[in-house]
Image (spheres, rainbow, N blue to C red):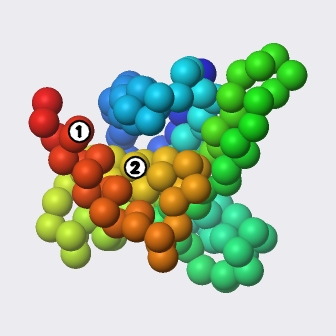
Amino acid sequence: MIEIINQQHRYWLNIRKFKELLKRLSTHYKLNDPEITLVFTDNRTIKKLNKQYLKKDAPTDVLSFPIGEKGADRKYYLGDIVISVPQAFKQCFSEEHGLERELEFLTIHGFLHLLGYKHSEGIEEEEEKMENLLSED
């Protein structure tokens, strides 16, 4: 099951589109109906999480919290992705694309971290493959 929580109310988001994106990524990686939570939040909340878990006292764009195990109900719990929508909004200007595109990229990035990809181990190449695959539609 994919759960999407929108804790911020400043920007309108097409929640259904992000649920579909996570379904497509799960299918591509042959994950059978994994439990994933995607949270859209604000800078204050993500800054608090960043400080608590990574000891960095600043907002960031995306955090991933991999679980990667089967629960008692035999469901596969992949983990949680938390995205700061205001931070993504700032970044979309420097990347010269819209907010929705930036949020899609951050969702892919967070998903790959849930699968175990690291910045030092080829996450950029995998992101590019996923973006190309998803843009073929």
Q: Tell me if label 2 and label 1 are in contact, CB under 8 Å.
A: yes
Q: Quadrant of the N terminus?
A: top right
Residue 101 location (% of width, % of height)? 25, 50
125 or 80, which lies in front?
A: 125
Q: Residue at x 48, y 52 (%)?
A: 112
Residue 102 location (% of width, % of height)? 30, 56
Q: Which residue is mark 1?
A: 134
Marks 2 and 1, the one that precedes in the sequence: 2
Categorize mark 2 by other alpha carbons within 10 Å: few (<14), some (14-19), many (20+): many
In the displayed structure, 93 sits above or below 10; it is: below
Categorize mark 1 by other alpha carbons within 10 Å: few (<14), some (14-19), many (20+): few
In the displayed structure, 30 sits above or below 134; it is: above
Q: In the structure shown, which secondary structural element does the residue marked by tag 1 occupy?
A: helix
Classify residue 29 by image quadrant.
Answer: top left
Query: Is residue 103 visible in the rendered structure shown here?
Result: no
Q: Residue at x 68, y 29 (%)?
A: 76
Q: Residue at x 41, y 64 (%)?
A: 123
Compute the Cα span from label 2 to label 1: 10 Å
Residue 95 location (% of width, % of height)? 21, 70
Amino acid, disc 2:
Ile
Q: Quadrant of the C terminus?
A: top left
Residue 39 location (% of width, % of height)? 57, 44
Q: Outermost residue toward the top?
A: 73
Q: Does residue 66 appear to the left or right of 102 in the view shown?
A: right
Q: Residue at x 67, y 53 (%)?
A: 65
Q: In the structure shown, which secondary structural element does the residue marked by tag 2 occupy?
A: helix
Amino acid, disc 1:
Leu
Classify residue 99 by image quadrant.
Answer: bottom left
Query: Is residue 79 visible in the rendered structure shown here?
Result: yes
Res 108 label:
2
In the displayed structure, 120 sits above or below 131; it is: below
